[in-house]
Image: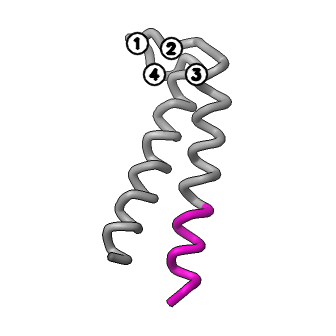
Amino acid sequence: MKLLANVIAVLATLVGMLWVLQGTNIVRGSFMSGQSLWLYIGIALVIGGAAALWWINLRS
């Protein structure tokens, strides 16, 4: 169960990083490119994923 939670937290962090890059228009070719809303959503997801990863591994 802990492995699955770690995988989900890492995937959330990576998706958040992608959304940050799209929101800043570094990664182009999507409707999200250049939209600051996706920058903020991505930042929130990166913080949430990293916090979840920390919390999951803290409980061991």
The x and y percentages for residue 14 are: 44, 46
Q: Which residue is mark 1?
A: 30
Is tag 3's residue or tag 2's residue first in the polypeptide sequence? Answer: 3
Is tag 2's residue or tag 4's residue first in the polypeptide sequence? Answer: 4
Taking the magenta stretch, the answer to whether it contains residue 57 is yes
- Contact (Cβ within 8 Å) of mark 1 with mark 4: yes
SS for dot 4: loop
The amino acid pointed to by label 1 is: Ser
Label 2: few (<14), some or many (≥20) within 10 Å? many
Q: CA distance from mark 1 to mark 2?
A: 5 Å
Residue drawn where x is 54% and y is 55% of the image: 49
Q: Which residue is mark 4?
A: 27
Q: CA distance from mark 3 to mark 1?
A: 10 Å
In the displayed orientation, state which residue is furthest to the front.
1
Q: Which mark is residue 33?
A: 2
- The magenta stretch is 51-60
Quarter of the view holding residue 44: top right
Q: Which is more foreground, mark 1 or mark 4?
A: 1
SS for dot 1: loop
The amino acid pointed to by label 2 is: Ser
Q: CA distance from mark 2 to mark 4?
A: 7 Å
The amino acid pointed to by label 3 is: Gly
The x and y percentages for residue 33 are: 50, 14
Taking the magenta stretch, the answer to whether it contains residue 28 is no
Q: Which residue is mark 3?
A: 23
Residue drawn where x is 45% and y is 49% of the image: 12
The amino acid pointed to by label 4 is: Val
SS for dot 2: loop
Q: Nearer the viewer, residue 47 or 5?
A: 5
Q: CA distance from mark 1 to mark 4?
A: 8 Å
